[in-house]
Image: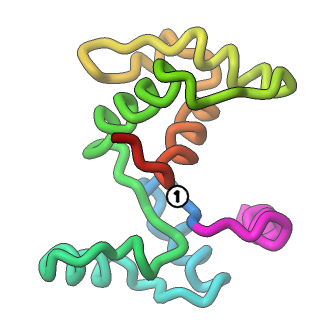
Amino acid sequence: MIDKVWRLVGKYDPTKIYIDGANPSFIRSLKMQIDEDPEYEKEIERAQHQKIDYGSWMKVLPVNFAKEHVKMLAHTRAFLDDGFIVIDPRFSKLITSLHTATDVEGKLDKSGTSYNDIFDAFRLSLRLYLFS
C-alpha cells in the first residue's frame, strides 16, 4: 500500500495527505517514505499544547474519525448543499455512496451507505478546503 500511495504522491504531488488515524504503523511508514518525522503523535501533542497548527508543516495528516466524524459529515454536507462540488459521472461508486449516505443524528449510518470507504475518502479529501 505504501508503494501505491508513493506512486500517487509522485504523480499528483498533493499539498496534504489526509489519512485515517486508525493505523499508526501505516502513517509512520508513509511519513518515513516522504521524509517526515514518524513520531507524529509527539509532534501533534506538542503543537496542541502550544496551540500551534501542526497542519502547517506536516504533509501527512492523520485524522481521528472517532473524534471528527460529526464535523467531517457536516463539512461535506455544507459543500454539497451549497453546490460547491461537481462530480464527474465516471465516479459512479462515489455518486452511489453520496446518494445512499444516511445521516443519523449527525453521524453517518455506515450500514445504509454503499461504498462507505469511498465516502470516507471523499470526506478526507475535503479537509483541505475551508467552508464558512
Q: Position of residue 128 (x, y in %)?
A: 50, 55
Residue range corresponding to the magenta coloring? 1-15
Q: Residue at x 43, y 24 (%)?
A: 77
Q: Tag 1, which secondary structure?
A: strand
Between 29 and 43, the one lying in front of the other is 43
Residue type highlighted by circle 1: Tyr
- Horizontal side of residue 9 vs 115, given as left or right: right
Nearer-the-camera pick, 127 or 3: 127
Q: Quadrant of residue 131?
A: top left
- Provide the major secondary structure of the magenta segment: helix
Q: Which residue is mark 1?
A: 18
Residue under the image location 66 percent in, 83 percent down: 33
Q: How is the image coloured?
A: rainbow
Q: Could you tell me which residue is drawn at 38 percent across and 38 percent down?
A: 72
Viewer-proximal residue among 19 and 24: 19
Residue 22, image x, y percentages: 42, 54
